Image (tube, grey):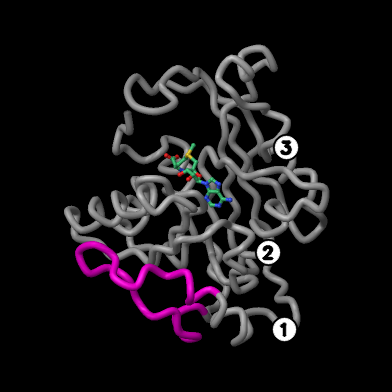
Amino acid sequence: MWSGQPSTPLVSETRELRPGRALDVGCGEGADAVRLAEHGWDVTALDVSRVALDRAADHAGRVGVQVRWLHAGLVEAALPPASFDLVSAQYPALLRTEKHEAELALLSAVAPGGVLLVVHHPAPSKEQANAHGFDPDEYVSPADVAALLDDRWRIEVDETRPRNVITGAGSDHTQDIVLRARRFPIPLVAEANDSAVARISKFELSKPASGQGRDLSRDALAGTNRPP
Ligand SMILES: C[S@@+](CC[C@H](N)C(=O)[O-])C[C@H]1O[C@@H](n2cnc3c(N)ncnc32)[C@H](O)[C@@H]1O
């Protein structure tokens, strides 16, 4: 059962950030996206599950905040590079590939000066995972993301914390791995081009529940560095 509550690490790790453009990757039923929008962020949230997105949009409608919902996988969404001041992936279920497409898509979406926040449960043992019908080796972990951070990044947080969530999905987990990295404010050439914006637009839910959704215009995605 979904708790409807935002992730504790999302709340704590974004509290001191100045609101800007945020991307919630694998937003599920939208509690984090709604939380960020309530706190002044311009939020784009994507998920492969249309059912989850519809519930998320309902939630946003009830709360009265706007979120741009994208029905797409992270890699397939072909997000405009360097377009978000915060890229958040909370307990993502991103497939690991030889070319690290998912990890690179996360990194690429972060604007100069922006923050990447990846949170996950520690991987269960193979036996535990197999009992639940999945192989943890098939999924991207915070460590996989951290391994790709080069000298354009500063790791601000990389730790395992106790977790105390007593209801909803994931309440059986007792720890969170939290990776927070900041991209240094050096812009790359040819970022945020028009064709990328055109590609992303086709995934936007045309009629999100309760009237959310905005044009993904170049102005909306363009921006300046927003250090905290
Ligand atoms: C464990 S849930 C976490 C949901 C939410 N972030 C939270 O913390 O409650 C993982 C979510 O990732 C979504 N997902 C799986 N593969 C994805 C992908 N390739 N791109 C985007 N979302 C994906 C699933 O549909 C699901 O909603």
| Residues packed near mark 1 inside 10 Å, few (<14), some (14 to 19) or many (20 plus) | few
Q: Give the residue at x 57% y 28%.
A: 121
Task: Find residue 37 and report its horizontal and vertical position in percent.
Answer: 33, 59
| Residues packed near mark 2 inside 10 Å, few (<14), some (14 to 19) or many (20 plus) | some
Q: How far apart are labels 2 and 1 at the CA level?
A: 12 Å
> Is the residue 122 above or below the residue 83 in the image?
above
Q: Is residue 144 magenta?
A: no
Q: Nearer the viewer, residue 42 or 61?
A: 61
Task: Find residue 133 and report its horizontal and vertical position in percent.
Answer: 59, 23
Q: Give the residue at x 19% y 54%.
A: 63
Task: Find residue 85 and report its horizontal and vertical position in percent.
Answer: 54, 64
Identify the amino acid type marked 3. Ala
Q: Is residue 214 magenta?
A: yes
Q: How far apart are labels 3 and 2 at the CA level?
A: 17 Å
Q: How far apart are labels 1 and 3 at the CA level?
A: 29 Å
Judging by the rendered image, the residue that carries numbered circle 1 is 190
Question: Of the numbered discs in the image, which one, if any, rests on residue 219?
Answer: none
Judging by the rendered image, the residue that carries numbered circle 3 is 143
Judging by the rendered image, the residue that carries numbered circle 2 is 108
Q: Magenta residues, as a range?
A: 200-221
